[in-house]
Amino acid sequence: MLQYKDILAQIYSVSQEIARDKQEINETTDLVVDLGLDSMAVMELLAAIEDRFDISIPLNILPDVRTVKDLALQIQQLMVES
Amino acid sequence: MGIFDKFHSLAADQRALVDSGVNPFNVVIERLISATEAIVNGRRTILAGTNNYLGLTFDPQCIEAAKKAVQDQGTGTTGSRMANGTYVGHAALEREFADFFGYRSAIVFSTGYLANLGMLSVLAGQGDTILVDAHCHASIYDGCRMGSAEIIRFRHNNVIDLEKRLRRLGKKTANTMILVEGIYSMLGDRAPLADIVTLKQKYGAYLLVDEAHSLGVLGEHGRGLLEEAGVGNSMDFIIGTFSKSLGATGGFCVSNHPELDLIRYASRPYIFTASPAPPVIASTRTALKILETHPELRRRLWRNARHLYQGLDDMGFSLGPEISPIVAVRMPSIKQALVLWGNLLDRGVYVNLALPPATPDSASLIRCSVSAAHTQEQIDYICKAFSDLREGAIALDAQSTAVDSPLDVTPAF
């Protein structure tokens, strides 16, 4: 099973491809405020991550996701469940 | 600080629209001349963005039925379907919808939006999963949000992506419902419904199709994509609206599941609103009969659709992926879309403007919809207007914009 840090690495790599405001990404980076992702870009980011991890991310979790860390923890949880 | 602070960016976008002199969200229809013509800004205008696919809003039989219903039953029911708001006509229309599709039963809702809210808020329960096409209408997403199921989007019209997601669900597919539309409202493309039925059967999931834009438009009898695709008996739920080909306001759901009737007792959007007014029910009943028995309306509609699509395609516009009564023109920027939209209206052609985030892929769309009631001359006029205005709109620098930020209103998806 993938470790938390592997999930983080994947999120960094996908986010950097999609982000409009290029900058250093870490666990506390806010996907909307810091990376400038609008609602469509967030969807694009999620779709790319779903492909990489072979999971489906329910839209319901989105209100709880603000930072890269929030997203990584949700993905980890989803991978445990699947 | 105050409750209106959150509207600051919306207010700025709205100001920019007003300052640009073109506000597509503030059109007032001053007088209607027919199903395809009206007076707008004091000018005679062809209506090419009204979803009035069969042009039945001014059908003499429908008008007569509505007039009689107002005289006999009054202007409104003033009550819920669950209280005093079910008249003989409401019950009869439910029977007629069920018979029209050859299904067991139907429920009539007060609007198409409420049909999706009313059904999905109840069907998408705890422990269930919804697989929803990325291009589905806002009412489908809103209905899902009112329920407590897990909501998973799949890529638009992509059966490979859908199957991947069904596979990932494992045993949960028995509690999974797939949501698609017959014709998608923004780009006018159809769902690959036969393939989706195959997947639904293979994985034991449920399938709901919203035929809002395809009822009366597709199929020999106008039953929609399910009829055209030859999978008429395979739906778990069929949703539709009165407000497009049926020319009124209202919504319905049809199903073979006997549990459909239970929805009435649990669905807040069904219970806590007044039922459709008598003239609406009367005109819709008449329109449904006309829709079924007049295939020549569909032939005229498709002739007009081909005419407009081919005309705009020949001019080099970037259009939706297939010919349909919804002809969507992709513009390179919001500014160019706004300018073209405004110039079309000045020339006496009303179409819809659809901007991100209410559009797929953040596209800026000039969205036309044709009607069976359009004449060849009207379609020619629309084509000519596009042709004359094309260069001016395309020549605008996409970057030098007065309105260059997406209108950041609530996303449709």
Image (cartoon, rainbow, N blue to C red):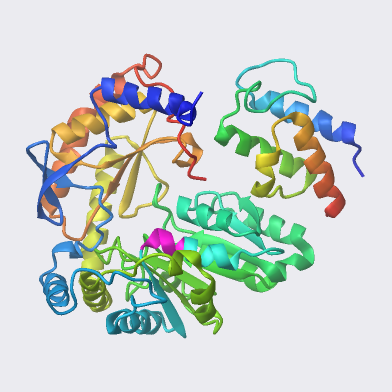
Image x and y of residue B37, in percent: 12, 50
Q: Is residue B191 left or right of residue B302?
A: right
Residue B210 or residue A31, whichever sits in front: A31
Q: Residue at x 79, y 22 (%)?
A: A26
Image x and y of residue B104, in percent: 47, 85
Rendered view: B230 above or below B248? below
The quarter holding residue B198 reads bottom right
Rendered view: B133 above or below B278? above
Residue A21 or residue B64, whichever sits in front: B64
Range covered by the magenta-colored residues:
B111-116
Main SS of the magenta part reads: helix
Image x and y of residue B33, in percent: 8, 53
Q: Residue at x 42, y 47 (%)?
A: B321
Residue A31 or residue B343, whichever sits in front: A31
Q: Is residue B112 magenta?
A: yes
Q: Residue at x 33, y 21 (%)?
A: B16
User: Can you see residue B268?
Assistant: yes
Q: Is residue B328 left or right of residue B343?
A: right
Q: Residue at x 56, y 35 (%)?
A: A39
Q: Is residue A61 magenta?
A: no
User: Can you see residue B137?
Assistant: no
Image x and y of residue B173, in percent: 71, 67
Q: Is residue B298 left or right of residue B62?
A: right
